[in-house]
Amino acid sequence: MSSKAYAQTIVVLTLALTDAAMAGLALFAAYWARLWIPWPNEAQNVGRFFDYAGVSAIHILSILVVFAFSRLYHLARSRSRVDEFSSIFTATTLGTLVGVAMTSLALKNSPLELDYSRGIVGYGWAFTIVFVTAGRLAHGYVYARLRKRGWGRDRVLIVGANEVGRMIVQKIQSNPGLGYE
């Protein structure tokens, strides 16, 4: 495996692990938010957090699968933060719906079946969007710092010595976090 392919594989794997950790953390925060915030109604029949292990695993897995099908693990350097957030919002919404459906189908009449709170689902959806976005921003920051140090850089050839070519060279040289040399 070439060093470029190795670097891309490491980046995608760490991004997926970051997304999984943030989705799990979002459900943990949703559980506690549902207990502390009596909205829309007072929480009733909410068990321990560990009772939600099956729900959490299905939620994380559905988020990762929907993100993969939404091409959120394809590396693109020119994506704006607004586009990234929009993609995360859409994929998280779909992933949460898939997770709720899979939870209802997979855990029905099993020892892991429980009557989970709709509030936890709502809070989990919102917190997943916020936490995954924050995790991806942190991951992108770390990856840009690594590219500045020369890790995972791509070579680029600029054809033309006119004003546009010089402007592109200046942009690449002034921003080593882009990962081009």
Image (cartoon, rainbow, N blue to C red):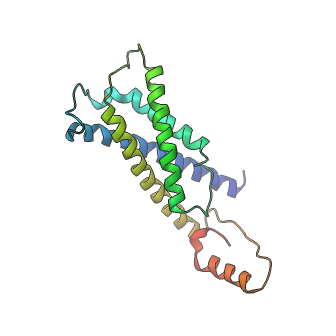
- At 51% from the left edge and 53% from the top edge, which residue is drawn? 86
Relative to 73, does residue 115 appear above or below in the rendering?
Answer: above
Report whether 103 appears left or right of 50.
Answer: right
- At 55% from the left edge and 63% from the top edge, which residue is drawn? 80
x and y percent of residue 28 in the render? 33, 39
Report whether 120 appears left or right of 165.
Answer: left
Report whether 55 appears left or right of 145.
Answer: left
x and y percent of residue 122 in the render? 35, 38
Q: Which of the 4 image quadrants contains residue 114?
A: top left
x and y percent of residue 67 in the render? 55, 43
Relative to 147, does residue 61 appear above or below in the rendering?
Answer: above
Relative to 149, does residue 99 appear above or below in the rendering?
Answer: above
In what quadrant of the picture does the C terminus appear?
bottom right
Q: Is residue 84 visible?
A: yes
Q: Is residue 149 visible?
A: no
Q: Which of the 4 image quadrants contains residue 7?
A: bottom right
